[in-house]
Image (cartoon, rainbow, N blue to C red):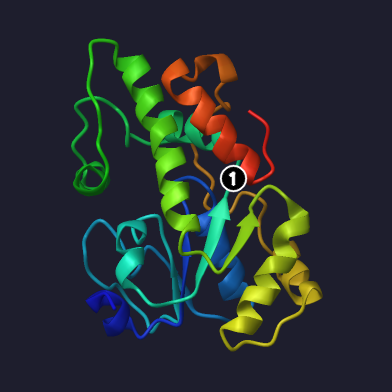
Amino acid sequence: MHTRANEANLKFLIAGTGRCGTGYMAALFNELGIPCGHEKVFNADDKVKGGPWVGDSSWHCVPFLPVIDLPVLHVVRHPLDVIGSLLNATRLFEPNAHGKHQRYLEKHFELRGGYDADFVARENAARYWYQWNTRIRTYASARVNIDHRSTLGNVANFLNCVGFNFTYSDVMSAREKLPCRTNASATPYERVDRGQIPLTMIRCLKNEAAYYGYEV
């Protein structure tokens, strides 16, 4: 198992892309009384922060899933919303941005370049959503669509499988106590239009989205 997962003595992981709802899910688990960090174990600083944590919710854990023997809850969100948020509320795919999160991503994902900065950013963001989710679902024990209320029952099932006793009603009650914009970006953004997705990515993005019940 990965050394940081051992160091933190984790029981589970929540994995998704950036801007898909990992922060919200950490808040939901904490509302249920389960100490779950948001990027506290797997993060761009490569160190455990705070704790003790029972779980960690993070996009940074994905490259290490093949060597982590823990139950994984896969969090997904509509790709056009995620891509819109990534492009407008973060600098992750901004050309010539060299923050710690981009440096982390560059270690584990091919950030392609080109003359048209906007096109390159959209292509990289779409390919990231596609590749990150396909990597996660190979190891996922359960999945929740952050924008599909009906899938929240999977959270209760997942928690029961990792040793906690919660019902769907418990999860929904905790959800009602959370602000609807938990971990939402302060920067307004709009989902990208399907026509803005490069043709090189539209087919595989469409197929992967359909696997989760989304239309692109």
Does residue 93 lie above or below 211 as drawn?
above
* Kind of residue sitting beneath label 1: Arg
Does residue 153 lie above or below 184 as drawn?
below
Does residue 188 lie above or below 32 as drawn?
above
Residue 78 pos. (x, y %): 60, 39
Q: Residues within 10 Å of mark 1 (few under 14, many from 20)?
A: many
Q: Find residue 89 and report its image quarter.
A: top left
Quadrant containing the C terminus is top right
Task: Tell me: 61 left or right of 37.
Answer: left
Q: Is residue 80 visible?
A: no
Q: Please state which of residues 110 and 83 is positioned toward the viewer in this rendering.
A: 110
Give the residue drawn at x 30%, y 63%: 64
- Location of mark 1 (residue): 77
Residue 116 pos. (x, y %): 29, 11
Give the residue drawn at x 64%, y 46%: 212
Task: Tell me: 78 left or right of 169.
Answer: left
Residue 87 pos. (x, y %): 42, 29
| Residue most extreme to the top | 115
Q: Please state which of residues 155 and 100 is positioned toward the viewer in this rendering.
A: 155
Give the residue drawn at x 77%, y 70%: 173
Q: Please state which of residues 138 and 192 is positioned toward the viewer in this rendering.
A: 138
Task: Tell me: 9 left or right of 142.
Answer: left
